[in-house]
Amino acid sequence: MAYWLFKSEPEAWSWAQQKKKGAKGEPWSGVRNHTAKLNMMKMKKGDLGFFYHSGAEKAVVGIVEVIGEYRPDPTDEKGVFGLVDVKAVEDMPRPVTLADVKANPKLKAMSLVTSFRLSVQPVLDSEWKELCRMGGLK
């Protein structure tokens, strides 16, 4: 299993909206970055990801699961980019802010810190465990 981080502006797509989709989940569409596309192409069903509110909040607020692997994104008129399907798994008991991540020496090399503009990022096993600990998950 691999771990990921999905960023979304809460005004465009929020954690509350993701949770309302339930078990059927929602396509993670609209990604228009080649590195993010390559990350999504590596995803497998069952992989887990952090749901991150960007914008003013800048915090990990939940956990999602990949339930549909990479396929063409119908919102891409040029047919270059794709999407994966994700469903909400659980809330982060304590949201973990970007400031919290940057303050933790164990996370100094995390993509969230080093590639902060990338919308879909890989997360190392050690980073996953540390962020879960920080957020109150076991």
Image: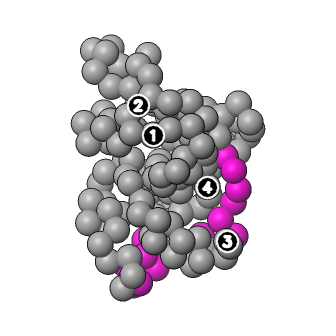
Picture coordinates of residue 85 (x, y %)?
56, 32
Q: Residue sitting at 25 percent across and 36 percent down?
A: 34
Q: Residue sitting at 45 percent across and 40 percent down?
A: 43
Q: Earlier in the sequence, mark 3 or mark 2?
A: 2
Amino acid type, residue under disc 4 in the picture: Ile
Determine whether the residue tagged by mark 4 lies in a helix, strand or loop: strand
Which stretch did the figure color magenta?
Answer: 88-104
Q: Residues within 10 Å of mark 1 (few under 14, many from 20)?
A: many
Q: Which residue is mark 2?
A: 30
Amino acid type, residue under disc 3 in the picture: Leu
Q: Residues within 10 Å of mark 3 (few under 14, many from 20)?
A: some
Q: Is residue 32 visible?
A: yes
- Which quadrant: the C terminus? bottom right
Q: Which mark is residue 63?
A: 4
Q: Which residue is mark 1?
A: 43
CB under 8 Å between callouts 4 and 2? no
CB under 8 Å between callouts 4 and 3? yes
CB under 8 Å between callouts 1 and 4? no
Q: Is residue 16 above or below residue 45?
A: below
Q: Earlier in the sequence, mark 1 or mark 3?
A: 1
- As measured in the structure, the alpha-carbon distance from the residue carrying label 1 to the one carrying label 4 is 15 Å
Q: Which mark is residue 66?
A: none
Q: Which residue is mark 3?
A: 137
